[in-house]
Image (spheres, helix red, strand yellow):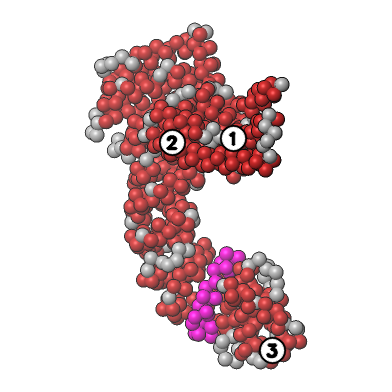
């Protein structure tokens, strides 16, 4: 009877999950010792418990020792995996599992190695074991999804990626990409089934595609023979099935392996026939990749073509350059196509090639900049751009050194807008702002635009947006640079264009604080008067910049305070801003008002106003922007210090407690 119980318990032990097995193994040990006790009456309960404790300690010690050995074998496996020696990696992972059966990372790592070797069933088995160790193991589901995809189990693959999202919703972007891959591969599979059915039916176009590709695979023919064949093929690629037939009959391989065609692409100086071959291939790629994601993937993942595209785009042969651009524009129309372009092309060379189109005064320049705009808006491009920024900066500086008079103005404007958008990202802006040549190029370009502001209004407006972003990076390239930028913008405040005026004020609101010398010069040239005018007549954005500029000027320059008082008698404009719903305006208006209280006798002129009540409400408000409470409290303190009679008003309003509460904002600031 005892033997039967032992057998049943052992069978049960084998079936349970690994992460529960240790508990059951202890139970099994207790059971065995109980059986021993039945035949050993002389063993006391104390001795039995001591025996159990000793065994537990020994087991824990062995597990620690095995963990050390398993970790070492895992590292050896990882080293072999990195070298591409997947068989050796599997051997090490397997040896590690002999030491520690419930180490899930060994299962997931071995599954990954099996996938590399194409042994998908074994990979699935290892993923199952990893999930028995940890039912929320996302790596197991990830490798399982890849294995199912390779086996064309599309529904199962989707379920794995969706399960990862359930476990960790933060992986939304990554799983979206993998789910898209499942969709694209399933779609390609269906396309190939339809293509095979068409071929089996004997339809003329299907047979002709196959025969043409067989002809193109013949070696050592005249170049025009291949050009003619590709032109016929291009005309035949009218629907998705025919494009798929091109793929399943090895069209990409046949073209790329053809020595005559390869030689035509490799020649630096091409004759007419070689140009014809190159153009024919590019037109064929456009035809076969139209609305066919799998063909797009095969083309862009081919190392030769991925390497060639940027150089073709920069070709001196106009037709080759134009067709290369058309191919990329076509690819970039879909999210999948943009992803392929961004992932597989040399980003620096691509950027340089696209920027070279600025030499054209026709629509090709606009088309190239439109393509670059689409790419630059993609988050994947922005990530790669940051990584490649040191290599890309010289090309961008080259754009800023161009003469706008001999460049396509609209395309140039688009290009600068792209730089402005990219500079909005802090890491990119940091690199740009740290590059002295880039900052100087911006200044030089602004100076050239000022020579004919009416002609280059749009470019100037866009360039100011880029400079505004650069000015968010503190410290600036240099105080000299900040001074020169400020001078340029002070000059621009005299123009009549509202957009340029607003952005010039925006730049000033960010550069003036870098130096008292800049503030003094700005005040002497009438910046306070212009900002007061903005506050009277400007829109919300212009008012933001204007009040920020006044706050900066009055914070450190006494003459600026006196000028504000002279131009805004009784502080009508500032008092009106204090009642605004816009917390940015309110906070800076309170700061500016507080600064002005340092001018003698000014506070006394406000005794008949309700300024104390207004500031007190702001200091005790629940504003989301702490600068409102802080600046209102400081202004209130300066007001009472300058004119003691305000202190009595404050006490009557029981405002001392509120004023004291603003101390925490001062401490936190």
Query: Which sits earlier in the primary sequence, circle 3 or circle 1?
Result: 1
Specify the principal SS of the magenta part.
helix
Q: State the residue in front, 22 or 415.
A: 22
Q: Which mark is residue 477?
A: none
Residue 324, given in percent of the width and then of the height, sits at 38, 34
- At 61% from the left and 80% from the top, the residue drawn is 634
- Classify mark 3: residues with Cα within 10 Å, few (<14), some (14-19) or many (20+): some
Instruction: Write down the residue under mark 2.
Output: 73
Task: Magenta stretch: give its range.
Answer: 539-562
- Cα separation, mark 3 vs mark 1, equals 71 Å
- Classify mark 1: residues with Cα within 10 Å, few (<14), some (14-19) or many (20+): many
In the image, residue 7 sits, relative to residue 607, either above or below, namely above
- Cα separation, mark 1 vs mark 2, equals 19 Å
Residue 297, given in percent of the width and then of the height, sits at 45, 30
Instruction: Write down the residue under mark 3.
Output: 647
- At 38% from the left and 71% from the top, the residue drawn is 479
Q: Does the magenta stretch include residue 30?
A: no
Q: Is residue 90 left or right of residue 561?
A: left
- Cα separation, mark 2 vs mark 3, equals 77 Å
- At 52% from the left and 65% from the top, the residue drawn is 502
Residue 23, given in percent of the width and then of the height, sits at 64, 36
Instruction: Write down the residue under mark 1.
Output: 133
Front position among marks 3 and 1: 1
Q: State the residue in front, 339 or 222.
A: 339
Q: Is residue 556 magenta?
A: yes
Q: Count all numbered tags in the image, as a single digit.
A: 3
């Amino acid at each position: 009877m005892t033997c039967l119980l032992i057998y049943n318990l052992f069978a049960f032990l084998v079936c349970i999950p690994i992460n529960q097995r240790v508990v059951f193994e202890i139970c099994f040990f207790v059971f065995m010792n109980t059986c021993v006790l039945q035949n050993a009456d002389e063993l006391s309960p104390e001795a039995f418990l001591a025996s159990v404790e000793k065994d537990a300690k020994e087991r824990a010690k062995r597990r620690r020792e095995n963990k050390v050995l398993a970790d070492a074998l895992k590292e050896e496996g990882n080293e072999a995996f990195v070298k591409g020696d997947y068989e050796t990696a599997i051997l090490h992972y397997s040896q590690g599992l002999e030491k520690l059966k419930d180490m899930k990372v060994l299962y997931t790592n071995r599954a990954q190695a099996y996938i590399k070797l194409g042994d998908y069933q074994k990979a699935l088995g290892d993923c199952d074991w990893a999930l028995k160790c940890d039912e929320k193991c996302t790596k197991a589901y990830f490798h399982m999804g890849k294995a199912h995809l390779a086996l064309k189990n599309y529904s199962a693959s989707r379920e794995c990626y969706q399960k990862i999202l359930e476990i960790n919703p933060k992986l939304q972007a990554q799983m979206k990409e993998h789910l898209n891959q499942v969709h694209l591969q399933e779609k390609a599979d269906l396309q190939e089934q339809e293509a095979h059915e068409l071929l089996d039916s004997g339809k003329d176009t299907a047979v002709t595609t196959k025969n043409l590709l067989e002809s193109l695979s013949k070696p050592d023919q005249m170049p025009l023979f291949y050009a003619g064949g590709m032109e016929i093929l291009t005309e035949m690629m009218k629907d998705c099935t025919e494009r798929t037939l091109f793929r399943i009959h090895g069209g990409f391989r046949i073209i790329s392996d053809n020595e005559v065609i390869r030689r035509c692409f490799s020649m630096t100086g091409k004759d007419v026939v070689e140009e014809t071959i190159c153009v024919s291939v590019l037109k064929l790629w456009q035809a076969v990749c139209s609305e066919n994601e799998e063909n797009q993937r095969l083309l862009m993942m081919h190392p030769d073509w991925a390497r060639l595209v940027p150089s073709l785009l920069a070709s001196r042969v106009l037709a080759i350059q134009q067709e290369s651009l058309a191919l990329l524009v076509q690819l970039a129309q879909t999210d999948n196509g943009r992803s392929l372009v961004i992932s597989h092309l040399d980003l620096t060379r691509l950027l340089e090639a696209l920027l070279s189109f600025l030499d054209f005064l026709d629509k090709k320049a606009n088309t190239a900049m439109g393509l670059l705009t689409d790419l630059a808006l993609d988050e994947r491009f922005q990530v790669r751009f940051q990584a490649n920024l040191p290599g890309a900066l010289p090309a961008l500086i080259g754009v800023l050194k161009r003469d706008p008079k001999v460049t396509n103005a609209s395309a140039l404007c688009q290009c600068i807008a792209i730089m402005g958008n990219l500079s909005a990202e802090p890491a990119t802006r940091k690199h740009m702002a740290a590059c002295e040549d880039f900052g100087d190029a911006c200044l030089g370009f602004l100076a050239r635009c000022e020579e004919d502001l009416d002609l280059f209004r749009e470019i100037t407006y866009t360039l100011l947006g880029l400079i505004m972003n650069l000015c968010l990076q503190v410290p600036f390239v240099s105080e000299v640079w900040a001074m020169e930028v400020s001078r340029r913008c002070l000059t621009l405040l005299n123009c009549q264009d509202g957009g340029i005026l607003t952005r010039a004020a925006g730049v000033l609101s960010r550069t003036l604080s870098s130096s008292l010398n800049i503030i003094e010069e700005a005040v002497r040239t009438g910046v306070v008067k212009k900002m007061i005018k903005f506050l009277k007549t400007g829109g919300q954005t212009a008012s933001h910049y204007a009040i920020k500029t006044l706050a900066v000027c009055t914070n450190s320059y006494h003459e600026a305070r006196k000028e504000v008082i002279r131009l805004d008698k009784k502080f009508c404009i500032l008092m009106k801003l204090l009642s605004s719903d816009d917390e940015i305006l309110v906070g800076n208006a309170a700061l500016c008002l507080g600064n002005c209280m340092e001018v003698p006798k000014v506070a006394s002129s406000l005794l008949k106003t309700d300024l104390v009540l207004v500031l007190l409400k702001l200091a005790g408000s629940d504003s989301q922007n702490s600068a409102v409470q802080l600046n209102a409290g400081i202004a209130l303190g300066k007001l009472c210090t300058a004119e003691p009679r305000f202190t009595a008003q404050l006490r009557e309003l029981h405002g001392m407690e509120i004023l004291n509460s603003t101390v925490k904002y001062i401490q936190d600031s």
